[in-house]
Amino acid sequence: MGNAQAAMFDDPTWPCQQRKVQELSIGLMWNRALPDAFDLDTRRPLPEEARNLVALLSLRRVSLVEAEDAVKSFSGNTEFADPQTMLFIFAEIFTTLGKTRRDVISGIEQYSLKQIALSERIETTRSEMRDIEETADPDFDRIDLLEEQLDWDERVFRDRTRSLTHVCETPVLIEKRLYAIAQLLLKYAR
């Protein structure tokens, strides 16, 4: 019963069981104190080695094992593995993956609106079929066309509903990746 109540169902554009969290906080993932006046929009420039690490770790296809190898190599081969630089590296990754996550959430909202529109179209088609069937001289050709459209729309609706679980997991996977990367950077910060 606790899981069922965890999701907020008052937003028709959010069909997922996971609670919709529009923006993440860097402070929740970076478990060391942030410098005074730290701002994601005014970070300092990073050295080339650090920018290369940011580019690699921002790729979701890079496994966490590969990510750890890259962070370990970076921390051993450069003088830039201090906690402050590691924070700025994470801030860049956080910004990049945060934008990706927001784009995914926006896509889920659009997905939901399409499902709502399709549901309404299905109901309208059913209503039209009932109205035609209740007339004295039903137009069976029109009923056949409506049945065909209804079958197609219901199939599309069901297929989209089945894929919803995967779609809804994507923001969660990005959050987990961000947290894991933060922990890797903290682990190898000198």
Image (spheres, rainbow, N blue to C red):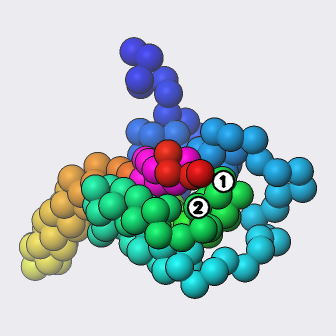
Helix, strand or loop under label 1:
helix
The circle on residue 81 is 2
Q: Are marks 1 and 2 in contact (CB under 8 Å)?
A: no
Q: Residues within 10 Å of mark 1 (few under 14, many from 20)?
A: some
Asked whether 95 falls inside the magenta stretch, the response is: no
Instruction: Assess disc 2: are there few (<14), some (14-19) or many (≥20) residues with their C-alpha within 10 Å of its C-alpha.
Output: many
Figure check: 176 above or below 133: above
Mark 1 lies on residue: 83
| Residues in magenta, as a range | 176-186
Q: Quadrant of the N terminus?
A: top left
Label 1 – label 2 distance at C-alpha: 7 Å
Numbered badge on residue 142? none
**Would residue 58 be visible to someone looking at this image?**
no
Q: Which amino acid does label 1 sit on?
A: Pro
| Percent of width and height locating residue 157 | 25, 60
Residue at screen point 66% across, 63% down: 85
Characterize the magenta stretch by its predominant secondary structure. Answer: helix
Q: Which amino acid does label 2 sit on?
A: Ala
